[in-house]
Image (cartoon, rainbow, N blue to C red):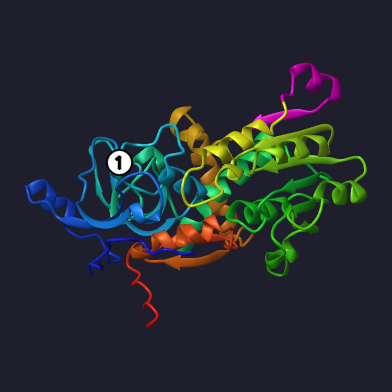
Amino acid sequence: MATNVANTEHVSGGGTDEPDQTATDAVKGTEPEMRAVVLQSFGGVNRLKVMKKSIPVPKDGEVLVRVKACGLNFLDLMMRQGSVDDCPRTPFILGTECSGYIEALGTGVENFKVGDRVVAFQRSGTFAEAIAVPAKYVYEMPNKMTYEEGAALGVCYAAAYMMLYEVANLTKGKTVLVHSAGGGVGIAVAQLCKMVDEIKIFGTASTGKHEVIKDKFDHLFDRSACDYVEAIKKLEPKGIDIVLDCLCGEDTNKGYDLLKPMGKYVLYGIANVVTGETRSFFSYARTWWNVDSVKPGKLWDENKSMSGFQFYHYLFNQGGEERVNIVMNEIFKLHTVNILNPVIDSTYAFEEVGEAMLKMHDRKNIGKILIIPEQEPKPKPTP
């Protein structure tokens, strides 16, 4: 049953479309405030609270972004549950991607100016009216791109682009299977595959999503309603060239078995471990227990490849900022010429982040869910 965010109170406010004196006031010694979605302790959506916090002052190499739209990702759900190894200590502000405009510059920032419209990634803290972000994780948006489009493109399209073109080496004539085809990454994969000739795209998604996304895929399967492995083998007896798996568990084994010789399996998520609103150790144990051990000799003998891709680890922990910057600029160019167009499922106010998360928990979204700082909460139905 859906639950609302507990202990929240609507506070009017939010950014305007033009830079203001917020950062200047902060430097003078006052502490201007902003609204933010704070995780008070790990657990369910009732641990979220919209609170007033001091607006940060950008440090050396940072920019202050006035947030206009935030992307909700599966990682945010896992962070709320405490299922991510390098989570900040609670309480902290949730959110890992946003779009907005630069309101102030820290010292040493040369590639941006106040007023630039940008997409930004951060380890946490984007579900706020403003956030200080290292400039190396900030990307200037094209003029005609909306803030909503910027937030929807971000992580989903960067991850899909890097998996397809850099990890899996997508080339003409290949077959691709992607799970959660109706999600933000799944739709991004489908659009990016269309850029290469003679690609056949298979996807798994619940039956209710098929009508909406059928034009983006060659074949769709509902994992809960059919044996998708057997169905794909009937269509492609030799197997699949590329499997993109955000599920893990038994689907890892199925994905590996579907690979044809020289095929590539890429794990980019572990959604099967998130089976409810709160963390389940049973789900974790079952997911990893169901993954078969694949020895190097088996890969060698069968001419198959297995790899993993965790976008945020690559960006924040493994020095991937230069490569991600190149990828983001390429994605922006492809959007400008109308090749990449994100599908936005719905938008929510700060006070409705819990509802947004529950929708994602239930896998009911088609495309990207966005959080909009300036959006008013929807009226509650009268009893």
**Residue closest to the far left:** 29
Residue at screen point 41% across, 51% down: 44
- Asked whether, in this view, residue 24 is left or right of residue 91, the answer is left
- Asked whether, in this view, residue 112 is left or right of residue 182, the answer is left
**Residue closest to the far top:** 297
**Residue closest to the far bottom:** 382
Task: Identify which residue, 272 or 302, lies in the foreground.
Answer: 272
**Three-letter amino acid code at disc 1?**
Thr
Question: Does any portion of residue 168 appear in the rendered image?
Answer: no
Where is 345 relative to 303, above or below? below
Residue 26 position within the rendered picture, expressed as x and y whole percent measured from the top left: 13, 49
Question: Does any portion of residue 235 appear in the rendered image?
Answer: yes
How many dots with numbers?
1
**Over which residues does the magenta segment extend?**
293-308
Quarter the C terminus occupies: bottom left
Residue at screen point 82% across, 44% down: 174
Callout 1: SS = loop
Residue that numbered label 1 is attached to = 90
Residue 71 position within the rendered picture, expressed as x and y whole percent measured from the top left: 46, 55
Quadrant of res 310 = top right
- Asked whether, in this view, residue 229 is left or right of residue 278, the answer is right
Q: How crowded is mark 1: few (under 14 residues within 10 Å), some or many (20 or more)?
A: some
Magenta-colored stretch includes residue 289: no
- Asked whether, in this view, residue 203 is left or right of residue 108, the answer is right
Residue at screen point 69% across, 42% down: 244
Task: Identify which residue, 320 or 183, lies in the foreground.
Answer: 183
Residue 7 position within the rendered picture, expressed as x and y whole percent measured from the top left: 27, 61
Where is 351 relative to 303, above or below? below
Task: Identify which residue, 314 or 244, lies in the foreground.
Answer: 244
Residue 299 position within the rendered picture, expressed as x and y whole percent measured from the top left: 79, 23
